[in-house]
Amino acid sequence: MNADTDTLEGLFEKIKKNIDTLSNEESSKIEDSFILDTNKMIKDCALVIDKEGIFSKNEEVDDISTSYLKYLLLDFYMGKSHLQFKEQQGRKFHLLDGQSRFERFIETCNRFKIISDSEVDVLTEEEGPVTSESLAAKRERKIASYKQEKAAKERMKQLEYIVSLSAEGLDCEEELRELRLLQLRSYAVECISEMEMINTEITMMQFKDSLPPGIGVTGDPREPPGPIPNKKGIEVTKLSKDQDGEIVMTRDTVKSNVFKFDKKITVEQYGDQVLENYHASQTQAANNPTTKEETAPRRYSKLLEDGDEDDSDLVEQATRADREWDVWKEDNPRGWGNKAGKRF
């Protein structure tokens, strides 16, 4: 028994260390093989516990040695490990297995009276018809549960400090047992929250699987979307002026394939093309700097200043610009936009 117990103790500590690793912020960088190895160690640890008969179906929590209480956490650890599995192809299996492990852990805690029947009912109750009374009752239960959990965590901190003094020779058997029982209860409550998230993710997976082919996210998520399903195109209203200066509205139809993606390229390749075209236009603009004043037709007075009055093309452009300016001034007399003679 001693050799097996030493092996069991060391194996459990290694499992606990792996679970702590999976629970930290860097868990996203951990490979799935690490999770599978952790699950195997948990199964091996459970086999040793069954072989040694550490737990009995007929015993109560008071009959369990304090040093063995931590082994009740194996189902909880297995559930936490399953949740970290990343490969989408097998994730649903791991979610369902993790959910069953959490349910088993809650049943174990309930069987040993670590968590009462009423607490299990409150934590696992299904949503009924929403009324003002049900909302108020649910809010009261959540407040009470929150206060209870807060008090339990504060007590655990106190007990952890006291237990740490056992290294100095202080007898902390009672405090250690209380700490273990509080930890088990706290983890049972955590299981409920984890199971709710599992149910949500599985529902999303089932919805995705129920979609017809071609709808939703399929294949490589980086693949560009297909063309907009609009065979007739998009109608665009344009405003312009006729020869008499009257505003004319026209409707044009933009071809439907204007917004069509080339399926032969990915989004990254398309983005590279857009970026390359942008840099090319910037380079062209830098090599041929022009301003709005340079591209706009000059007035005839400006041509006289620049000495270009002999250029017939420029004179024609200037004459047209002067005429358009005169027409605009006639249509928009000074103060035309003011109300009641007010000037702003």
Image (cartoon, rainbow, N blue to C red):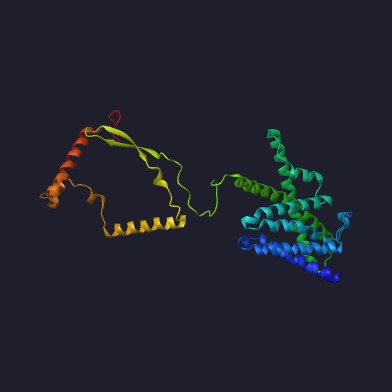
Measured as percent of width and height from the top left, residue 39 is found at 72, 61
Residue at the extreme bottom of the image, as rendered: 3
Q: Quadrant of the N terminus?
A: bottom right
Measured as percent of width and height from the top left, residue 81 is found at 69, 59
Question: Is 102 displayed left or right of 32 in the figure?
Answer: right
Residue at the extreme top of the image, as rendered: 340
Question: Is 137 displayed left or right of 178 in the figure?
Answer: left
Q: Quadrant of the C terminus?
A: top left
Measured as percent of width and height from the top left, residue 324 is found at 20, 39
Q: Which residue is drawn at 43% across and 56% down?
A: 271
User: In this view of the protein, can residue 188 be seen by the observer?
Assistant: yes
Question: Is 109 displayed left or right of 265 in the figure?
Answer: right
- Count the marks: 0
Q: Which of 67 and 174 is in front in this view?
A: 67
Q: Nearer the viewer, residue 99 or 309?
A: 99
Q: Residue at x 68, y 33 (%)?
A: 132
Residue at the extreme left of the image, as rendered: 310
Reply above or below: 99 against 250. below
Measured as percent of width and height from the top left, residue 250 is found at 32, 35
User: In this view of the protein, can residue 152 be seen by the observer?
Assistant: no
